[in-house]
Amino acid sequence: MQFIDLAAQYQHLKTKIDTRIAAVLEHGQYIMGPEVQELEAALSDYVGVKHTITCANGTDALSLALMALDVKAGDAVFCPTFTFFASAETIAFAGATPVFVDSDEKTFNICPVDLENRIKQVIDAGELKPKVIMAVDLFGLPADYPAIKEIADKYQLKIIEDAAQGFGGEIDGKRAGSFADIATTSFFPAKPLGCYGDGGALFTDNDEYAALLQSLRVHGKGKDKYDNVRIGMNSRLDTIQAAILLEKLAAFPTELENRNRAAKNYTNDLQSQFVAPFVPEGYLSSWAQYTIQVDNREQVMQSYKEQGIPTMIYYGTCMHQQSAFEHLGHKEGDFPIAEKLAKSVLSLPMHGYLCADSVE
Ligand SMILES: *Cc1c(COP(=O)(O)O)cnc(C)c1O
């Protein structure tokens, strides 16, 4: 049994994907070919936003979003401590200061109560300028955007939605990628919507941000890429990856249903033994990970391993515990919920082709 079975997906979509790749090899427009625009239109349509700007990976997408929001040294960006490193890394890479926030006990996402407390602390300390809230749709579940939006409005902050894991998730029928001033996603192969290499995208309804992001991803281009009006990056999605994603996006709704069916079966079978994941009323998860909480993690992992069931720990180290952020001076106990999660979470096999027999 595989933790994520990318081979099963390829076997399922092989003819379509091979045909799409062959078409790119024939027309030869490897950079910014027609498939890139076709994909951006299809993604905007699916997510329900005005603009999609694809880029080289999910980390660049976050960096581009921070650049578009003019985040720089002296700015505070609030992000969960229980997340993948890239969320916090890009804030520091922009020269700004990541201000970590504890998690909600049930959803594992950024805790709105702790978020407001940390914003107040930054204002009281008077050293940093609160600028952006970077919420993460952890393991596929959208963060609590209704509450986050209220706080953002109150303190006049912008919101970035890191939907690298959240693509396909929903709140009351509205899709992940549409909840923030700028949202980002990743097409890393293991994400809910993955390509066959690196890839990423940004989503926004704002025309100015969209124009800025289109310039920033190609060396800060003006009229063309040899007219450079600002400092940007080289961060484009390869045409071949766009071609692959067009076929994967077409299959995505069915895969999302399968993931939700598998999650339901897991929960039915496991909730008497472990703390199963919680999905609030009106929310839909894309199940980037199916993550349970266990007391005796080592033993449970060992026993699953002996039965040929792979498990993974996402994440065993919070951002405030990473050596790279040692200089921020945090200590054990600063983020009690996140620290407890890091010690007890365990993710089970999950992908769009997981059948009921395998779940059992
Ligand atoms: C994977 C991931 C990223 C980064 O995406 P890459 O495409 O690997 O650069 C950012 N944030 C979160 C939460 C992720 O899971």
Image (tube, rainbow, N blue to C red):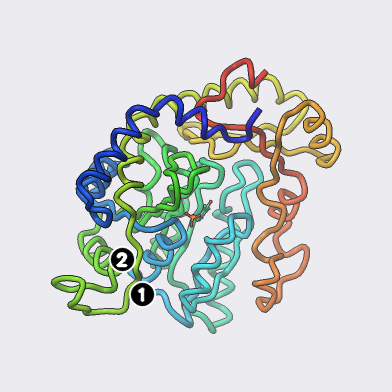
Image disc number at residue 1: none
* 228 or 115, nearer to the observer: 228
Q: Is residue 190 above or below residue 215?
A: above
Where in the figure is residue 289, as x and y percent of width and height?
59, 39
Where in the figure is residue 283, as x and y percent of width and height?
47, 35
* 7 or 27, nearer to the observer: 27
Q: Give SS at disc 2.
A: loop
Q: Residue at x 24, y 58 (%)?
A: 206
Q: Which residue is mark 2?
A: 217
Q: Which residue is mark 1?
A: 70
Amino acid residing under circle 1: Asp
Query: Toward which corner of the image does residue 39 lie, by quadrant?
Result: top left
Q: How far is mark 2 from mark 1, CA to CA?
A: 15 Å
Query: Toward which corner of the image does residue 14 lie, by quadrant?
Result: top left
Mark 2 packing: few (<14 Cα in 10 Å), some, or many (20+)?
many
Q: Give SS at disc 1.
A: loop
- Viewer can see residue 87: yes
Among the two numbered marks 2 and 1 on one chain, the one whose residue lies closer to the N terminus:
1
- Count of marks placed on residues: 2
